[in-house]
Image (cartoon, helix red, strand yellow):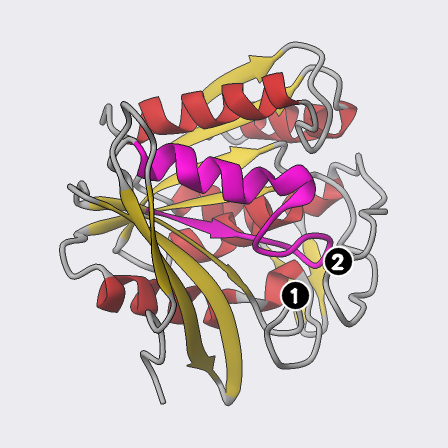
């Protein structure tokens, strides 16, 4: 029953900002039903943003970050979709690590295009391990023309996923070897090579109070990876304060419409 989305919609008014609709989604990925939300502006631009999550968060985000980000961007004309991949949040399926959700991302992008036929290209937005998942996928899909990577994780793979997807984030961070080889069952995932192979635009936003990204920055320089880097002073790994969340939303919205 693909496209069982859009059954529940409501209009959000944003004062001086653009109004937008929210559509509740339910779509199928490899036999499992996934749940998501699309924020649709009154006058959408042709570039949409897909929020990818990891096992530590689901489509709302810690401190409602993903919800607030989506509303801010939609109020500025940017369509946004956020979803729970298999085994996360309210979606079906077995829990899986960040390097095993490529099919989920591909399916979500297909649903996004179906919901928003005006779209011509996609920007993927991810935090921590989800940023790594975005990198692994992006260079394989010509529809993806941009990446927004928040505190991209340069540590070991995620803790063993647990059902529900809302557990506290408890990853071990800071190992340079991850960006050279992200371990998986059948060998290594070349994350740095994936980013080097991506021909689109990339924005990396780091928190000055999060030491886990220093290895990524060093590795990126070593591999001559091209991206725009913005640091938010004192911000932690999840940008937990309102000030930091608002700054992330502002940076994202401005960057998405300026290239």
For the point 86% across and 47% down, which residue is it?
170
Residue 255, image x, y percentages: 33, 25
- State the count of labels: 2
Question: Which quarter of the picture shows residue 234?
Answer: top right
Identify which residue, 88 or 157, lies in the foreground: 88
Q: Is residue 227 visible?
A: no
Extreme residue in the top direction: 233
Can you identify the residue that label 2 sits on? 166
Residue 138 versus residue 148 in the image, above or below: below
Residue 234 versus residue 93 in the image, above or below: above
The crowding category of the residue bearing disc 2, from other C-alpha atoms within 10 Å (few below 14, some 14 to 19, many at least 20), is some
Residue 154, image x, y percentages: 70, 39
User: Which type of secondary structure does the marked residue at label 1 adopt?
Assistant: loop
Identify which residue, 175 or 47, lies in the foreground: 47
Segment tinted magenta in the rendering: 49-75
Residue 175, image x, y percentages: 79, 38
The crowding category of the residue bearing disc 1, from other C-alpha atoms within 10 Å (few below 14, some 14 to 19, many at least 20), is many
Give the side of residue 118 with respect to residue 76, left or right: left
Q: Is residue 99 visible?
A: yes
Which badge, 2 or 1, comes first in the chain's sequence? Answer: 1
Question: Which quarter of the picture shows residue 38?
Answer: bottom left
Label 2–label 1 contact, CB within 8 A: yes
Can you identify the residue that label 1 sits on? 89
Residue 167, image x, y percentages: 81, 56
65 in magenta: yes
Find residue 141 and name its label.
none
146 in magenta: no
For the point 43% across and 59% down, which residue is it?
37
For the point 55% across and 29% down, which residue is it?
220
Quadrant in the picture for the N terminus = bottom left
């Amino acid at each position: 029953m693909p496209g069982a989305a859009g059954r529940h919609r409501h209009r959000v008014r944003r004062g001086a900002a653009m109004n937008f609709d929210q559509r509740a989604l339910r779509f199928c990925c490899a036999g499992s039903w996934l749940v998501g939300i699309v924020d649709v502006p009154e006058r959408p631009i042709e570039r949409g943003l897909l929020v990818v999550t990891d096992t530590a968060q689901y489509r709302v985000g810690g401190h409602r970050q993903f919800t607030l980000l989506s509303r801010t961007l939609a109020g500025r004309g940017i369509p946004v979709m956020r979803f729970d991949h298999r085994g996360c949040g309210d979606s079906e399926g077995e829990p899986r690590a960040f390097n095993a959700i490529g099919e989920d991302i591909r399916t979500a992008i297909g649903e996004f295009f179906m919901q928003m036929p005006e779209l011509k290209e996609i920007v993927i937005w991810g935090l921590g391990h989800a940023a790594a998942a975005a990198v692994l996928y992006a260079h394989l899909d010509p529809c993806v023309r941009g990446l927004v990577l928040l505190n991209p994780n340069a540590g070991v793979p995620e803790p063993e996923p647990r059902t529900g997807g809302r557990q506290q984030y408890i990853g071990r961070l800071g190992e340079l070897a991850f960006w050279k080889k992200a371990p998986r069952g059948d060998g290594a995932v070349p994350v740095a090579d994936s980013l080097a192979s991506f021909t689109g635009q990339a924005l990396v936003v780091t928190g000055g109070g999060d030491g886990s990204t220093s290895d990524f920055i060093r590795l990126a320089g070593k591999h001559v990876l091209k991206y725009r880097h913005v640091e938010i002073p004192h911000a932690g790994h999840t940008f937990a304060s309102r000030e930091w969340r608002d700054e992330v939303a502002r940076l994202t919205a401005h960057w998405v419409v300026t290239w």
